[in-house]
Image (cartoon, rainbow, N blue to C red):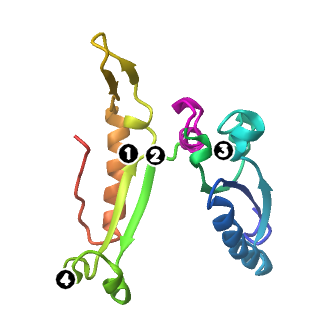
Amino acid sequence: MAAASDRVFKLLVLPGDGIGPEIVRETLRVVDWTRNAGLRIELSEALAGGASIDATGAPIAEDVVQQALASDAVLFGAVGGPKWDHLPRAQRPEMGILRLRQALDLYANLRPAVCFDELLDASALKPELIRGLDILIVREATAGVYFSLPRANEVAPDGQRRAYDTQAYTEAEIARVCRTAFELARTRQRRVCSVDKA
C-alpha cells in the first residue's frame, strides 16, 4: 500500500455562483498550502448551479455528478441568485447541490453554532442566553421536504392559489441520521434534542 504522502487525492472544485467563487478561491489557498507541505492533490474544476445553467441548461451536468463520484472530495461554493429566481423549481441552481447530495449519499448536513465570548456584544441576543453556546445541528439532507412527492403549486377550482409539499421519510433514513447525531453527541456534550418541522 502506498504511503499517505504518495497517494494523490482527487478534489473536484465547484465554485458555483454569487459568493461561491470568492470563498472557493480563498479555500484553495489552504489547499495550496497543504500541497506545498507535501500532500498530493489533483484539482479539477467544473460548473454547478447558475453557472452550469448558463452553460449547459442544467443545474449540474451528469458528467459532473460522475466526476464527483470519482473524486475523493468535492469543494462546493454556493449556488443561486436573482438571475435564476424565475426558473421552475426543477431547473433552479439549488437543484445542482440536491442532485449531488443524492448521488453522494450526503444525508447528514452538519451545522455547528458556537458563540465566542469576544463576539457576545455583536449578537442581537442577550449575552447571558448565548454565553458558551456550542451546538451542532444534524439535519437530514436527502429525503423529506427536499425530495418527497407529491408537491404542487396550483390554482384550485375556486380560483385560489394553493401549494403543498410532502415530507416523507423511511425508517432507514431516520435511523441513519439519528445514528449520526448520537455518534457525534458521544464526542461532545452527550446530549441530543430531536426537532422537526411538524
Which of pointers 1 and 2 lies earlier in the amino acid sequence?
Answer: 2
Residue that label 2 marks? 107
The residue that mark 4 highlights is 128
Spatial separation of the CA atoms under disc 3 and disc 2? 23 Å
Mark 1 vs 3, N-terminal side: 3
38 horizontally vs 164: left or right: right
Q: Residues within 10 Å of mark 3 (few under 14, many from 20)?
A: many
Identify the residue at image location x=38%, y=36%: 145
Instruction: Specify whether 108 is left or right of 8.
Output: left
Image coords of residue 32 (percent x, y):
76, 74
Element type at mark 2: loop
Q: Quadrant of the C terminus?
A: top left
User: Looking at numbered disc 4 in the image, what kind of residue is underneath it?
Assistant: Glu
Residue lying furthest top:
157
User: Which is nearer the N-term, disc 4 or disc 2?
Assistant: 2
According to the image, label 1 marks what residue? Answer: 176
CB contact under 8 Å: marks 1 and 2:
yes
Give the main secondary structure, helix, strand or loop, of the magenta stretch. Answer: helix
Residue assigned mark 3: 50
Image depth: mark 4 or mark 3 in front: 3
Tell me if residue 150 can be seen: no
